[in-house]
């Protein structure tokens, strides 16, 4: 698909789905304010309708008693699907954070156990968009049905930052601490690397050759570790794949997680998924939007992901 086709799909879908159209129209009045976290120019956005996912219960007992809203048989009758690749359907997300916001659902009801290898091909099918994954213990509100989401890559602050820290002519996987050290050295900045970024991640530039395939395989193997058991868990990960527009190369960010939600949840009512971890923290409640500080965001990030220490 092209961005023009995707925008047309959104427009066509909303013309037939009044409830979703109203939520997209409400985005025009969305509150957003910047928060600087070292090198990451993050933000806080108030989206009242996102309480559906931010406050979602994801325990097994709840999942067993509710119909899966991503299965075709249970979707709203107005929601249309486009087959984007074998086994995957593109849906307009009815609870948007951005004007272009898709869900990419597996056609089979299967659990959100690990980042699917198809995420790379799906990113290639959607140039201009970032295709991302919320692990079952890393922000997913529907861990019982394998799915991804997609938004404009330019909307996510972390992607813009990583493209500046990790140039496309430096292929392979690099840790955020290494990238930050190199950046600070080159820029002559006195800002310490530990304060430069609020959490650790891995950045990959994937070339279309054998070495690039090895990079892709290694990237997909990255995951988080359960702090209680000490075991690696494929559900503790946020993953982002997109095409770097100037070069056409596939890029990826992997954020290993250690918790689904911060210790203070639901006060504030912040349940970090991939968009939050990419630098735009979503708050359904106005009081949280008004009061969250940079220190609060650093604490939240440190409780769900590893601190970026060099």
Image: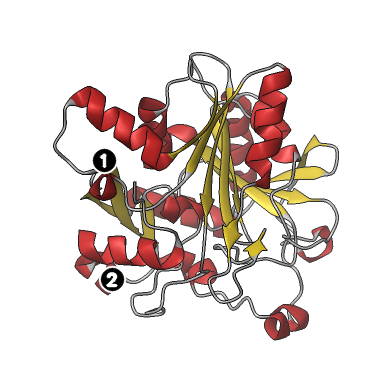
**In the image, which is nearer the foreground, mark 2 or mark 1?**
1
Specify the label residue 288 is tagged with. Answer: 2
Can residue 240 be seen here?
yes
| Residue 203: % across, % down | 50, 36
Q: How many numbered marks are there? A: 2
State how far apart marks 2 and 1 are (Cα): 23 Å
* Quadrant occupied by the N terminus: top right
Quadrant assignment, res 87: top right
Residue 129 lies, in percent from the top left, at 55, 33
Q: What residue lies at 61% left-to-right and 32% top-to-bottom?
A: 6
Residue at left 29%, top 60%?
A: 298
**In the image: residue 61, left or right of residue 130:** right
Q: State which tag comes first along the sequence, 2 or 1.
A: 1
Viewed as shown, does residue 195 lie left or right of 230?
Answer: left
The answer to whether 201 appears left or right of 181 in the picture is right
- Residue 186 lies in what quarter of the image? top left
| Vertical position of residue 298 compared to residue 191: above or below | below
Q: Nearer the viewer, residue 182 or 270?
A: 182
Please, what secondary structure does the residue beneath circle 1 have? loop
Q: Is residue 223 above or below residue 296?
A: above
Q: Secondary structure at mark 2?
A: helix
Labelled disc at residue 39: 1
From the viewer's side, name the closer residue of 143 and 40.
Answer: 40
Residue 171 image offset from top left, x and y in percent = 54, 22
């Amino acid at each position: 698909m092209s961005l023009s086709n995707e925008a047309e799909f959104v427009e066509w879908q909303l013309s037939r789905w009044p409830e979703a159209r109203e939520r997209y129209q409400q985005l025009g009045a969305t509150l957003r304010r910047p928060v600087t976290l070292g090198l990451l120019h993050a933000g806080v956005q108030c989206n009242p309708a996102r309480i559906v996912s931010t406050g979602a219960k994801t325990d097994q007992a709840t999942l067993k008693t509710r119909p899966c809203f991503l299965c075709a048989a249970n979707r709203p009758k107005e929601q249309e699907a486009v087959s984007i690749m074998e086994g995957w359907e593109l849906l307009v997300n009815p609870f948007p954070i951005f004007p272009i916001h898709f869900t990419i659902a597996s056609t089979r009801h299967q659990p959100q156990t690990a980042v699917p290898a198809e995420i790379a091909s799906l990113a290639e099918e959607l140039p201009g968009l970032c295709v991302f994954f919320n692990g079952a213990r890393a922000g997913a509100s529907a861990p019982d049905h394998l799915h991804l989401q997609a938004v404009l890559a330019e909307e996510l602050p972390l992607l813009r930052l990583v493209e500046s820290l990790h140039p496309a002519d430096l292929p392979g996987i690099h840790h955020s601490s290494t990238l930050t050290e190199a950046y600070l050295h080159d820029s002559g900045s006195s800002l310490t690397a530990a304060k430069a970024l609020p959490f650790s991640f891995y950045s990959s530039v994937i070339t279309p050759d054998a070495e690039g395939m090895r990079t892709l395989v290694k990237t997909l193997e990255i995951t988080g570790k359960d702090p209680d058991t000490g075991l690696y868990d494929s559900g503790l990960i946020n993953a982002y794949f997109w095409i770097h527009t100037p070069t056409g190369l596939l890029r990826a960010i992997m954020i290993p997680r250690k918790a689904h939600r911060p210790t203070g949840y639901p006060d504030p009512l912040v349940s970090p998924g991939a968009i939050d971890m990419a630098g735009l923290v979503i708050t359904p409640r106005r009081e949280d939007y008004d009061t969250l500080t940079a220190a609060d965001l650093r604490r939240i990030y440190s409780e769900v992901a590893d601190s970026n220490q060099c």
